[in-house]
Amino acid sequence: MLIESQEPDFVLNNLLLITMGKLLVPKGMILINQDSDHMYQISKIKGRNALEEGEVIKVEFPVDQLDCSVLHGNELPEITKKLGLGEDSVFFNLRTTNHHLGFLCLGPKGTKKPLTDGELEFIESLTIISSVAIANSRMFQELRLINRKLDRKVHDLNTLLELSKDFNMMVDRDEIARTFKFAMLGQMLIRTFFFVLDENGEKSMVADSGLKAKPSQKELQQMFELDDVFFCEDDHDCSFLEKNDIKLLIGLRFQNEKIAVVGVGAPANKQPYNNEQVNFLQSLGNLALLTIQKTYLLEERIEKQRMEEDLNLAKTIQQGLLPSPIPTIEGFDLAATNVSSYQVGGDYFDIVNTPDGGHLLAIADVTGKGVSASLLMANLQSMLHALAPIDISLSGATDSINDIIHENTPPDKFITFFWGKLSSDGKRFEYVNAGHNNPLLFRKGTEEPQELEEGGLILGAMSTIMPYESSTLEVQQGDILVFYTDGVTEAMNPEQTEEYETERLTRCLKENLHRSSEEIMNAVIDDIMEFSDGVQYDDITLMVLKVN
Amino acid sequence: MKNFSIATRQKQNVSILDIKGELDAHTASQLENALKSLIDEQNYAIVVNCSGLDYIASAGLGVFMAYIEDVRSLGGDIKLTNMNERVYNVFDLLGFPSLYDILEDEREALESFEN
């Protein structure tokens, strides 16, 4: 029965009762060694005695006798006195092969007669059996403890694994923070918890539980400046931690930058946090943080995708508005191109026939980029095409276009616009320049180009108070007209220190005037690309008209 | 949707939540809402009957942690009953029995509220 029992308490109690009963000893006790020299706990005590059960006392059994199976009280008078068992008491060593467990201490028999050899032998064998039973049950308990610790570890790991799966399916930051909070409360058995996140320098609490007060910005800042693992009993001057009885702060890093702080109050068992718990807290915190970071990346990607789609749409609109192929005009050599930039500027050019056999040539640059620019461009294009068949003056038409644009667009939307009409006989060119980069006219035989600047304000800035003025030029064989947008003159060198400017354009044109329109145009584009090393920030539009 | 449901019953002055299915990170908020609305309606004597609960994760346990003190400070309590062994093991492993009244069955919980 003693051996089968897994309860040391049961074993010891029976050992004491059996021996006392069998030998008719009125006083006895069992001392259990406390893993340190000479300290014993009175595990069981029977009979009148000043000592109490459970008490821990110092008993200096001679060390060299700890491997004897029986010690006699009259050889150890001090101990006998201390234990209050009377002279002739006997101490039976409770031991296994390599462990001293304690003593079964028996006072003298009621008859005062010494124990016979037979009785000694009997008790000795009983102590051996009991010692084995105690050792076994201790081992068993230890195993149970280890098992439980292991179970707990497995559970911790399971929680991490499960949460990493759960987090994977979450894109809502509030939900992630809330889940993190509840997992933390449940797993660590805590009541007080908070989670502060630094989003682009803005520190705010994204989840909390059991707080008595919210921290101020200053207190948030203080928390970020403490160690990554900070036990709040250490020195700090953040009163928020004091007020809410926060015990531990964990700083979490992403790409080596501290961007979150988790704080926890005491666990329900009031024990200080150990290393394993700190590790678990960090792991779970990092998991939550990574998931939150992931949501930002996801949003960025969606935003980028949306922008790409926007730009593609803008590009499609723009390309649809530009004439393709470039029409030919009898007696002239015409070349035009638009090199659109990644972001799609708002460049536009067009060549439209008029009912009287003439031709409208237009070039424009709409403010802004992307879809909004291309929509305004579409507006302009439709007005141009609506007006082309109607025989009204260029300047009057420009007045109307300006008013319509001004009325129908926000105040920050403008269009620089130049258009001109080539007469049906191809001898005259009447134009209006509404704030556009001055086209250049290279007269045959003259060095410097003439700038076509007559006109008025850019379109859309204000309603037409001053009518746009037009100007008419005679064109002769060999004259060359060059129209361009600011993407040409404002192209930047790779160092971003200099623009291409009109001077470089004029020089390049002069060197190529003898060539065809197409060749001139390509020479300019090549020159710009060389200057900017192929990096383009804005649309580049160029139109060259050579009189044959 | 995960298999989880909550139903509320009233027996005398005690509110009983029957929770069924799996209580995890995704379903924890349902339990939270149920507890919150009980507290809002000033029902502080709460029994959570876990007879239909198949599984509980830490996030589920956390919801209980988050509300126990509020309820107790208002003079009530949250008592848990009818857990299957697997669910109880999780509660036990994390040390809940020292903090919560975990009882065999609903009747016991109702009686303990009467005293």
Image (tube, coloured by chain):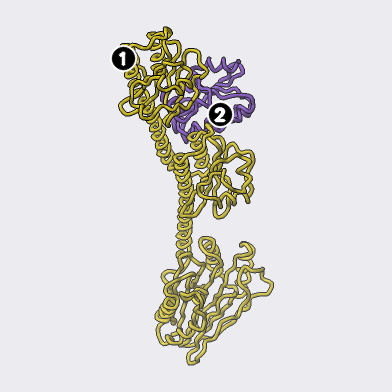
Chain colours: A yellow, B purple
Circle 2 sits in a helix, a strand or a loop, which is it?
helix
> To which residue does mark 1 refer?
A121
Q: Residue at x 48, y 26 (%)?
A: A57
Q: Count residues near mark 2 (Cα–Cα under 10 Å), then give few for <14, some for 14-19, many for 20+.
A: some
* Residue A446, image x, y percentages: 50, 92
Give the camera-side residue of A308 and A267: A267
Q: Count residues near mark 1 (Cα–Cα under 10 Å), then give few for <14, some for 14-19, many for 20+.
A: few
Give the camera-side residue of B70 and A275: A275
Q: Residue at x 49, y 48 (%)?
A: A252
> To which residue does mark 2 refer?
B34
Q: Please, what is the three-letter code of the amino acid marked with disc 1?
A: Glu
Chain assignment, label 2: B
Instruction: Classify A329 as above or below A302.
Output: below
Image check: A81 left or right of A464?
Answer: left
Instruction: Classify B17 as above or below A372.
Output: above
* Residue A293, image x, y percentages: 47, 50
Give the camera-side residue of A528 and A290: A290
